[in-house]
Amino acid sequence: MILILSTPNDDDTNIVMEHLTMLGEKFIRINDLDLFNGNTKMYYELSPEPKLFVENIFFGRINLSDIQCVWYRKFGFFDKFKKKFRGETNVEMLEYLKLEYTTTLDLFFDFLKDKKWLNNYLKVKNLSKISTLIASQKIGLKIPQTHITNHTDSLNLNESYITKSIKDGTVIDVGEKTFFFLTKEVNPKTMARYDHFFPSLFQEKINKEYELRIFHLNGKNYPMAIFSQRDRQTGVDYRHYNYSKPNRMIPYTLPEEIDEKICRLMKDLGLDTGSLDIIKGTDGEYYFLEVNPSGQFRMTALPCNYNLHYEVACTLKKMNT
């Protein structure tokens, strides 16, 4: 039996499940919030030996010892869970609840640690943007010059930089306003008036020819070119979507050397799947930016006619034997 660990409203999970059904595979899906909002019952007992059961209206009562393989799709987003407590508790209580939440998930994962995994949870959990950049350099991939600093002394005031989250971008609601933490262009001259600021990540702004989004699955890459630089709105980060004038997206063939280095990077990181972002600079160089193990891949599959959801389902089917 296949266990899918996902989050509500993830269309990639939904489509893979449809393929698994057509392939005749037995599977169950648990969303991270289901363990805490009552939709899925969980029962863990320690003696005489550890046992973990889950139950909901869709698949009944399941002993997770019967699970053969696990797809760690997206799971454990406390930010979604804490919205239920907005206005009802303080920061200290939220921190306490987060520790209880993550500790429960660790218990859940530990019970499943000896199963076959499509993206092992420990590898994903321990991944960081900075360690990934360091690993990519070691195998010969170029990266933009990168700084993490709380002042402008180390930055060239005559250059432009981009800034992004050191960990993961997110969406935060403050009162009636919503803030999206995406990649932004900044000029150090506008920040020079501050003696210091919160530690932040800065990278040199690469003049790009186009962006690449690459989905990786078990040693094979599926690249897509995004012509985001043709639109001022998407020029710095294509995720600033222009829905009235979408970017052109087409299948892409990577140079053999870059293709091999990406596969080696994913192997070194211990990742079976992931969505990678790379810039093709106007200088002809390829600049690695980051990899998201849980990145959505429908956006790559549909424009490029890559049958990625079927490929993921077939991978899980093979693991379930």
Image (spheres, rainbow, N blue to C red):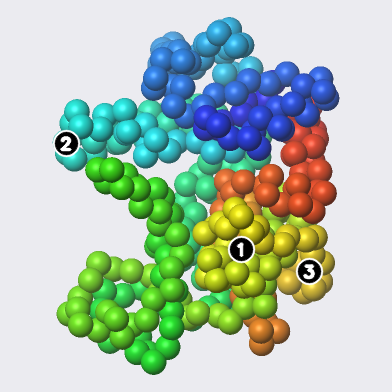
Tell me, for residue 90, which label it has, or none.
Answer: 2
Crowding around mark 1 (Cα neighbors within 10 Å: few <14, some 14 to 19, many 20+) is some
Crowding around mark 3 (Cα neighbors within 10 Å: few <14, some 14 to 19, many 20+) is some
Q: Position of residue 274 (x, y in %)?
A: 63, 51
The residue at the far bottom in this view is 158
Q: Amino acid at mark 1?
A: Asp
Q: Position of residue 155 (x, y in %)?
A: 35, 85
The vertical placement of 205 against 201, above or below, is below
Q: Is residue 291 visible?
A: no
Determine whether, in the image, residue 177 is placed left or right of residue 52.
left
Disc 1 element: strand
In-front residue for pair 217/196: 196
Which quadrant is home to the N terminus? Answer: top right
Tell me, for residue 289, which label it has, or none.
Answer: none
N-term-proximal mark, 2 vs 1: 2
Q: Amino acid at mark 2?
A: Asn
Q: Dot 1 corresponds to which residue?
A: 277
Tell me, for residue 254, which label it has, or none.
Answer: 3
Disc 2 element: loop
Residue at 42% x, 88% y is: 159
N-term-proximal mark, 1 vs 3: 3
Residue at 70% x, 27% y is: 17
* Distance CA(mark 1)–CA(mark 3): 13 Å
Q: Amino acid at mark 3?
A: Leu
